[in-house]
Image (spheres, rainbow, N blue to C red):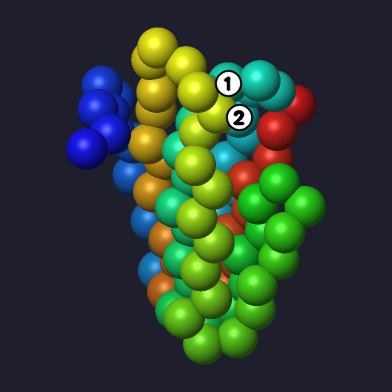
């Protein structure tokens, strides 16, 4: 099993959820849109139950980020 020392979850019912993550941060992303689109690390899924899961690169500490929107868009940006 993967040890996850920090678990962060964000949810929006209707609209846009944008989360900015520092470039190079060891973040494991699980993003979901009930109806809409999900964009993470240059990947995009759209439609009903759109979902993208991106594991964190190997690192001693990890953050698990769960981002979800009922209807709309989830976008994870690395800067």
Q: Nearer the viewer, residue 15 or 67?
A: 67
Q: Residue at x 50, y 55 (%)?
A: 53
Quarter occupied by the C terminus: top right
Q: Is residue 25 above or below residue 50?
A: above
Q: Is residue 51 left or right of residue 64?
A: right
- Is 73 rendered above or below residue 17? below
For this orientation, the residue located farthest to the top is 60
User: Can you say whether 18 is above or below 46 in the image?
Assistant: above
Q: Residue at x 70, y 33 (%)?
A: 78
| Residue closest to the eye, 69 or 39 | 39
Apparent side of residue 62 relative to residue 74 in the rendered image (left or right): left
Secondary element at image label 2: strand
Describe the element under mark 1 as helix, strand or loop.
Answer: loop
Of the 4 image quadrants, the one containing the N terminus is top left
| Left or right position of 33 against 47 | left
Q: Residues within 10 Å of mark 1 (few under 14, many from 20)?
A: some
Of the residues tagged 1 and 2, which is closer to the observer? Answer: 1
Disc 1 designates what residue?
A: 25
Instruction: Identify which residue is drawn at 69% across, 40% down.
Output: 77
Residue 48 visible to an observer of this rendering:
yes
List x then y, in percent, for residue 39. Answer: 67, 58
Q: Which residue is mark 2?
A: 21
Residue sitting at 40 percent across and 23 percent down? 62
Q: Position of residue 21 (x, y in %)?
A: 60, 29
Asked whether 13 or 9 is in front, the reply is 9
Name the quadrant containing residue 65: top left
């Amino acid at each position: 099993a993967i040890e996850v020392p920090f678990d962060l979850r964000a949810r929006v019912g209707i609209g846009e959820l944008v989360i900015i993550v520092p470039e190079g941060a060891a973040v494991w992303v699980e993003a979901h849109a009930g109806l809409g689109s999900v964009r993470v690390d240059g990947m995009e899924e759209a439609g009903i139950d759109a979902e993208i899961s991106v594991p964190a690169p190997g690192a001693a500490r990890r953050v698990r980020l769960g981002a979800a929107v009922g209807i709309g868009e989830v976008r994870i940006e690395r800067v």
